[in-house]
Image: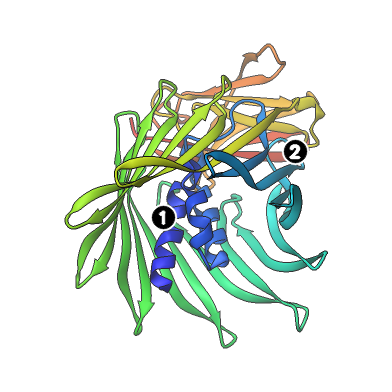
Amino acid sequence: MKKIILIMIIHLCLCSLFGIQDLFFKTINDDHLKNDLLKIYKLYEASSDIKMSGNFRQTNNITQLWTNETWTNYSKTEYLYINQNNYQQINTYLLNNNLWNNNDKTDYYYENGYVNYTITSNFENSIWKNYWKSLSFYNENNIIESNISQEWDDENSVWVNYYNYQYLYNSDGLIENIIINKWSNDNWVSYMQISYTYENNLVSQYNIKMWEANNWKNYYRINYTYNELGKNIQTINQLWLNNTWENNGKNEYSYNDQNLCSLEVYSVWLSNTWVEMIKVVNEYDNNLNLISSINLDSADGIWENRSKTINTYEEYANNQDILIPSQLSIKSYPNPFRSEGTSIIVSSQKSNISEVSIFNIKGQFVKQLKNNGIDDKNNRIFIWDGKNLENKIAPSGIYLVKVKDGTKISCHKILKLKS
């Protein structure tokens, strides 16, 4: 049973941004792995399709269930921010007797502009109780190196280690391996290993091995297929059974004219054929924000409503935000990008931006950028053509945009794909 739960957790991580997650939450018992693996997946959210666009941020979402031929509210999540794109707190509520009741909340704590740790609390007997803590550790280039997850021991009033995640990167700055250790008898012991294989800097395979009998053993893998625009159009997940890989599930993605995922179909492998089981239909507003996802399941070949998520957004003004670590924001478009280059948009309350530079994932200087002008919102525009100081095309991979604002430095991550 634990293996089945783990499979669902992993699948949840890979398709969480497409609306499937609501169908799985009720069946996942290990909230620890669920929450932490979701954070792992979000390391790649720059290449995801369903996300906030422009100067918009999500303020809440409501999940509804299809009961008695109508949509009925079930849960609500509210997002509070410390600036444009850094959470301060996330609150979840459940509906009971037509009232939204506290369920859980996650508070975010920052150091030097990056998440230092988060604390999740549950609302029990009319008080908030500690439940889960996640600490993040970074290298000198502010790239995450490890996470430690801890569970609250209420009896002894102390945080107890639970999982340890170690991130290893390849020469292009992409995650190559994640080693997960579990706390047991006052020591970290091997538990799980996640490895990534890439083609043109896009994940082609995601492989999970479990530590059993002092060896890493195959357990689960996902194979990815992309279209010519680098959009994921299919994933096939497989289980290692009887010393061979056997099909387990398949996701197929369709995109609208704005290259946003409009439809996802999930199938399971039964009697040597794919059987469609779940469908997700996504709708966007004119600002390309995902406003609703309807989840349907198939009963005797007939698609029936099951759940619906409604998202609400707000537009923010750059000059009203208190930013971390300095009073500026950095955006880029497109991101990821290929040979066409990318525009870096810097918004600052003060006019003391002295330097904008590109560095590779190893911290090596690539190029200093010139100011290419100011847009109608008084944002400064810097264009990187993807070339280095010698005017040669820089290798594909993750790069850091470093903006010097007075005595402070802010960073922004961009991904250059192979042409």
Viewer-proximal residue among 347 and 296: 296
Which numbered disc flags the more N-terminal residue, 2 or 1? 1
- What's the distance in space between the residues labelled 2 and 1, CA to CA? 31 Å
Q: Residue furthest bottom?
A: 185
Residue drawn at x 30%, y 32% as measured from the top left: 227
Q: Are marks 2 and 1 in contact (CB under 8 Å)?
A: no
Identity of the amino acid at label 2? Asn
Element carrying mark 2: loop
Viewer-proximal residue among 408 and 290: 290
Element carrying mark 1: helix
Left or right for 226, reference 279: left
Residue bearing mark 1: 11
Q: Determine crowd level at label 1: few under 14, some 14-19, many 20+ residues with C-alpha closer than 10 A.
A: some
The residue mark sitting in front, 2 or 1, is 1
Left or right for 203, reference 35: left
Left or right for 244, reference 214: left
Residue bearing mark 2: 83
Residue 203: x %, y % from top left: 35, 47
Please say if 384 is above or below 75. Answer: above
Please say if 345 is above or below 271. Answer: above
Q: Is residue 401 visible?
A: no
